[in-house]
Image (cartoon, rainbow, N blue to C red):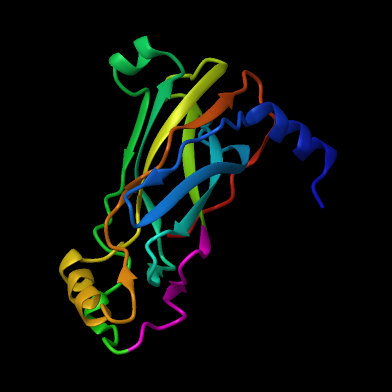
Amino acid sequence: MISAIERTVAAALLLILPLRAFNDATFVVTATLANGTYCSAPNGNTTLWIHIDVKYGNSLGVPMILSMATRVAEYQLFPNDAKGHLSGPLREFKSKSSAMFDASRLDRLPPDPQLFEMLQPGGVAHRIEKIGLAVRGPKVNRLPEGDYYLRVRVEQWPAERRWGEALARSWGTRGKLLIDSVTLPPIGIHIQQEPTNEPCPVRVD
């Protein structure tokens, strides 16, 4: 169950805006904020961890094949005004990892259901993407309280593209393998001035 504090923090933190869907005539992608929490590290940094619920809708008319291992490849944070957008992003992240798995070892017969989801026409699939946004710290410029928005690019095929193209050809009679990255509709957030913090968990990558 969600505690009263968590509900209060979530309500004050998240500004859920009506979002237009990305549509490339083969599938529709929408995105909403699932939840977000602040945490503090021993070095004095405060991070806002944001969970984004990305929904894929199959409007192609044939099955779609979606990797279980999607990820945020890039994001940019902008103030919620046109002037701030023109001056460039306040925060920016790009993944340094080129691949999450070795696709050359995948079986080219049926897609492994532990690695791929087969999305039938009219079906939907969800992926929760996680972003760690630096809010303030000794070596980080403080983000003032207010409204911002994120521009997020998600990789649907986090492996070498040539193997994705080969599998797409092999699985062509079974469905369409999604290998192109997608930029989500703008995602609105609200930064608090004095958020309720918890200690950041130790991450082991």
Q: Nearer the viewer, residue 191 or 179?
A: 179
Q: Nearer the viewer, residue 204 or 189?
A: 189
On the question of residue 137 being in view, the answer is no
Indicate left or right for 65 with 42 as reference. left
User: In the rendered image of this protein, does residue 165 appear above or below residue 52?
Assistant: below
Q: Quadrant of residue 75?
A: top left
Residue at 47% in and 72% down: 120
Residue at 51% in and 62% down: 125
Q: Quadrant of residue 107?
A: bottom left
Q: Is residue 48 magenta?
A: no
Residue at 49% in and 23% down: 148
Q: What is the x, y in percent for residue 58?
A: 44, 61
Q: Outermost residue, top direction?
A: 83
Residues shaded magenta: 110-126
User: In the rendered image of this protein, does residue 62 appear above or below residue 183?
Assistant: below
Q: What is the x, y in percent for residue 109?
A: 29, 89
Q: Is residue 117 magenta?
A: yes
Q: Outermost residue, left direction?
A: 162
Q: What is the x, y in percent for residue 168?
A: 24, 73
Q: What is the x, y in percent for residue 123?
A: 52, 65
If the image is split into quadrants, where does the C terminus sit? bottom left
Indicate left or right for 94 with 204 as reference. left
Q: Nearer the viewer, residue 185 or 4?
A: 185
Indicate left or right for 3 with 183 as reference. right
On the question of residue 44 being in view, the answer is yes
Residue at 25% in and 83% down: 105
Q: Outermost residue, front direction?
A: 61
Q: How many marks?
A: 0
